[in-house]
Image (cartoon, rainbow, N blue to C red):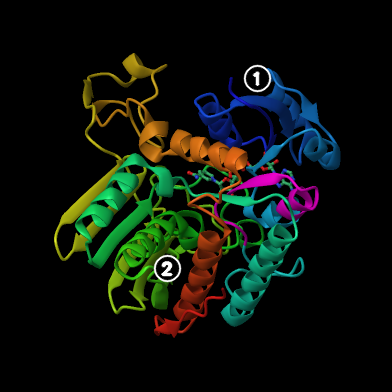
Amino acid sequence: MKKNVRTGIIGSGYAAQFHLDALQKVNVAAVDVTGVYSRNPQNAQKFASKNGLSSFTSLAEFINASDVLHVCTSPVSHEEIAIQVLQQNKDVIIEKPLTGYFGSDDSFNGETFSRKVGLEQAAASVKRMLEAEKASKGMIMYAENWIYAPAIQKEKEVIEKTKAQILWIQAQQSHSGSHSLDYGKWKFSGGGSLMGKGCHPLSAVIYLKAVEGMVLNGKPIRPKSVSCKTHAITRLSGFKNQGHLRDSYTDVEDHASVHLVFEDGTIADIVANELVHGGVKNYLEVHANNHRTICNLTPNNAMQTYNPADANFADIYVSEKIGTKQGWSNMSPDESWFNGYQHELDAFYKSHLSREEAESNSRLAADVIVTIYTAYLSAERKGEEVTIELEH
Ligand SMILES: NC(=O)c1ccc[n+]([C@@H]2O[C@H](COP(=O)([O-])OP(=O)(O)OC[C@H]3O[C@@H](n4cnc5c(N)ncnc54)[C@H](O)[C@@H]3O)[C@@H](O)[C@H]2O)c1
């Protein structure tokens, strides 16, 4: 008999839907979705009726009626909601990025604020969340699906079994632009491409070096310094938009390039941007002392189709953010599987039942946020190498 777990979804946009879909594939528990709560009650109601759920108007009552809460809201709201969940001693699954710095008043401008203040404030937000977790019977599970993507888990096995030393990782998440209206305004998203997209490959890179460190030395190998350059290409006065790329970002970067140095002197290069056609590029390549691995999370050629007329595939899902369905496509037979969404939730519900911490936990999330905001400080200093001051 599987144990019943009452689950609440907070937010009613894109992430809320893929969480709900992945919940259908959770194996370890019998998940009973309590309902949905969102900032906009009309959207919550729409999401609820589409998915046969109840919609709640009181967050406190919603938390009380659930055992596990999924925070699928815009980053600016993560801290406040997560702390409320933890104060009610419930487990909280928080979408990436964990938290950040979103400014202090209405005159805030993401282009001009001091990155030093941003780093201090983002680190303070992380600290408040970690303290709330410490004081709670609940735990934070950091919804970084890359950690659970089958290709990354397979690479973990290779590193562990061959005692590999990773010398250099190249990794990227890029696509043609986020659908979320809150994304692109620093006061809601806490940053641009680096925050919204770069956090995925960055998390996987930090995780794999930690795996290596645990095998070789019994402790993680952590990031030590970072150099970063950011650009706003779609805001250049000369950018000619032909309608295939989103260009409505107000005060965030749409390209970031990060060079990371770990405490053992090895390196990683991460790119994140909003300038890429043809679907989401989710890629990580490991160059080790004893092997080389290329993880093509998306796109990959597990399935390829040729379609002579776009309209033929009108009601067929091909892959996320594909521009056209005409011609050759890397159709994804199960995108959620390649992205690790169902593996992630299965692991989180296992942790919920066993009370053992998840692999993608608040410590990993904290390291990622501090690294990102240190990278923004480096970008402000035109790419100067800056030391990453990690807590714990
Ligand atoms: N892991 C992934 O692959 C992935 C993909 C997309 C988005 N995300 C993350 O998921 C989160 C949501 O992104 P999205 O694309 O679904 O955005 P979205 O704009 O589609 O939806 C955001 C939802 O949050 C709700 N919301 C905002 N502030 C709220 C508040 N204070 N209280 C309650 N509800 C609130 C909005 O009403 C909306 O329903 C973000 O953190 C984003 O980075 C993760």
Whether 237 is drawn above or below 226: the answer is above
Residue 74 in percent (x, y) is at 64, 49
Query: Residue at 36% across / 73% down in the picture?
Result: 260
Q: Judge the density around disc 1: few (<14), some (14-19), many (≥20) Cα neighbours within 10 Å.
A: few
* Residue with the mark numbered 2: 231
Cα distance between the residues tagged 1 and 2: 39 Å
Quadrant of the image containing the C terminus? bottom right
Residue 276 sits above or below residue 322 on the image: below
Q: At numbered mark 2, what does the secondary structure look like: helix, strand or loop?
A: strand
Image check: 153 left or right of 98? left
Q: Amino acid at mark 1?
A: Lys
Q: For mark 1, give the secondary structure.
A: helix
Task: Tell me which segment is drawn in magenta.
Answer: 82-99
Look at the image and tell me in which quarter the N terminus lies: top right
Is residue 172 on the magenta stretch? no
Determine whether 331 is above or below 371 in the image. above
Q: Is residue 250 above or below residue 104?
A: above
Nearer to me, 175 or 334: 334
Observer-side mark, 1 or 2, equals 1
Q: Residue at x 29, y 28 (%)?
A: 331
Task: Note whether residue 113 is visible.
Answer: no
Coordinates of residue 19 in the picture (x, y in percent): 56, 34
Look at the numbered discs 1 and 2 and tell me whether their residues touch, using CB distance below 8 Å.
no
Residue drawn 23% across the image and 27% down it: 303
